[in-house]
Image (tube, helix red, strand yellow):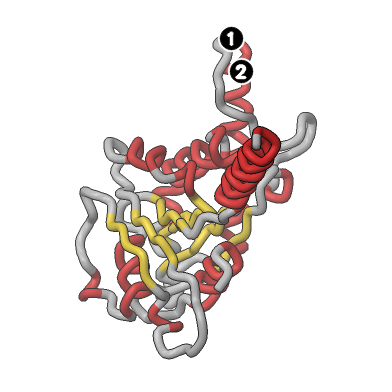
C-alpha cells in the first residue's frame, strides 16, 4: 500500500514539474511600441488593431493596451495567435511605464518620426540608448525594430540616413556614459565593442530598421516583425 502511495506521489510530482517547465516555455505574445511623443506610435497601434488611423489621434498620456488579431489577418482562416500590443507614452515623465511591460516583451517597435528626425536626433538617440542598455532587454535579447514612420512624406529621411545618424549619436553617448559608469558603477549594460565605432550589428539583440507610414497603412514590414516574434 505504501509502495502505491509513493508511486502516486512520484507521478504527481513529475506531472507538476513538467507543467511548470511547459508554462515557462510558453512564449510571450507581447509587442511594445515606444519612441518619442509625436512619432506616430498611437496611430500605428490603431492601424495594426483595426486598420484605422482614428484621424491621427492625439498624444497618449496612458498606455494603450489590447490583445487582438492584427487587422490584416482578420479574414484569415485557421488558428492565429492574438498579439498583445502595448503603446507606451513617449513623454519623458511617462517613460518609466516602459519597465512595466519590457519583462514580458517578445519584441520592441521603436518608432521614429522620419520627417522631424534631425531636430530630435539627440533625444531619439538617448531614449534608444536607454532602451538598448536596459537589463531586461539585453538579458533576454529582445529584438528591436526601429520603425521610421511617416516615410510617405517628401521631406522624410531614409532609413539608411537615420541609421547612420543614430549610430553616430549613440557612439558619442557610449563614450560619455562609459566615463560616468567608470566612476559610478551602474546596473546598465554597455553597447558596442571596445575599440570599435558603434554599429547596431554589435548589439547582443537583433536590431533592424524599416520604413513605414501609419497614416497610409504602409506597415507590412512592421506586421512581419510582429509575426516573427509572435508565431501564429
180 vs 115, nearest the viewer: 180
Q: In the rendered image of this protein, does residue 61 appear above or below residue 174?
A: below
Mark 1 burial class by Cα count in 10 Å: few <14, some 14-19, many 20+: few
Q: For the point 60% across and 56% down, which residue is it?
A: 163
Task: Describe the element under mark 2 as helix, strand or loop.
Answer: helix
Q: Which residue is at the front of the view, 105 or 173?
A: 105
Q: Which mark is residue 183?
A: 1
Q: Which residue is mark 2?
A: 179
Q: Residue at x 40, y 84 (%)?
A: 74
Instruction: Name the secondary structure under disc 1.
Output: helix
- 3D distance between C-alphas at marks 1 and 2: 7 Å
Query: Which quadrant is the N terminus positioned in?
Result: top right
106 relative position to 160: left or right: left
Mark 2 Cα within 10 Å, few/some/many (few <14, many 20+)? few
Rendered location of residue 146, percent (x, y): 53, 58
Residue at 61%, 52% (x, y): give it: 22
Residue 137 horizontal/vertical position (percent): 56, 41
Q: Is residue 3 visible?
A: yes
Residue nearer the viewer, 180 or 158? 180
Q: Are marks 1 and 2 in contact (CB under 8 Å)?
A: yes
Q: Is residue 2 above or below residue 223?
A: above
In the figure, 57 relative to 119: above or below? Answer: below
Q: Is residue 165 visible?
A: no
How far across and how far down the image is residue 72, in percent?
Answer: 43, 83
User: For residue 53, which quarter of the picture?
Assistant: bottom left
Extreme-front residue of the structure: 1
Q: Residue furthest right?
A: 195
Residue 224 in percent (x, y) is at 56, 73
Amino acid at each position: 500500500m505504501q509502495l502505491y502511495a509513493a508511486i502516486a506521489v512520484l507521478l504527481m510530482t513529475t506531472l507538476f514539474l513538467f507543467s511548470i517547465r511547459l508554462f515557462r516555455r510558453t512564449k510571450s505574445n507581447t509587442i511594445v511600441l515606444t519612441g518619442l511623443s509625436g512619432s506616430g506610435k498611437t496611430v500605428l497601434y490603431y492601424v495594426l488593431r483595426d486598420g484605422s488611423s482614428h484621424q491621427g489621434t492625439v498624444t497618449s498620456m496612458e498606455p494603450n493596451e489590447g490583445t487582438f488579431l492584427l487587422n490584416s489577418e482578420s479574414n484569415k482562416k485557421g488558428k492565429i495567435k492574438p498579439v498583445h500590443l502595448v503603446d507606451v507614452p513617449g513623454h519623458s515623465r511617462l517613460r518609466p511605464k516602459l519597465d512595466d511591460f519590457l519583462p514580458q516583451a517578445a519584441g520592441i517597435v521603436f518608432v521614429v518620426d522620419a520627417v522631424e528626425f534631425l531636430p530630435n536626433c539627440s533625444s531619439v538617440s538617448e531614449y534608444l540608448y536607454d532602451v538598448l542598455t536596459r537589463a531586461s532587454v539585453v538579458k533576454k535579447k529582445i529584438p528591436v525594430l526601429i520603425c521610421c514612420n511617416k516615410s510617405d512624406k517628401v521631406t522624410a529621411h531614409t532609413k539608411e540616413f537615420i541609421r547612420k545618424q543614430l549610430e553616430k549619436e549613440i557612439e558619442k553617448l557610449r563614450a560619455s556614459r562609459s566615463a560616468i559608469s567608470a566612476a559610478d558603477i551602474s546596473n546598465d549594460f554597455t553597447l558596442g565593442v571596445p575599440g570599435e565605432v558603434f554599429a547596431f550589428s554589435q548589439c547582443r539583440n537583433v536590431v533592424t530598421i524599416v520604413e513605414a507610414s501609419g497614416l497610409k497603412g504602409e506597415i507590412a514590414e512592421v506586421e512581419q516583425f510582429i509575426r516573427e516574434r509572435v508565431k501564429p
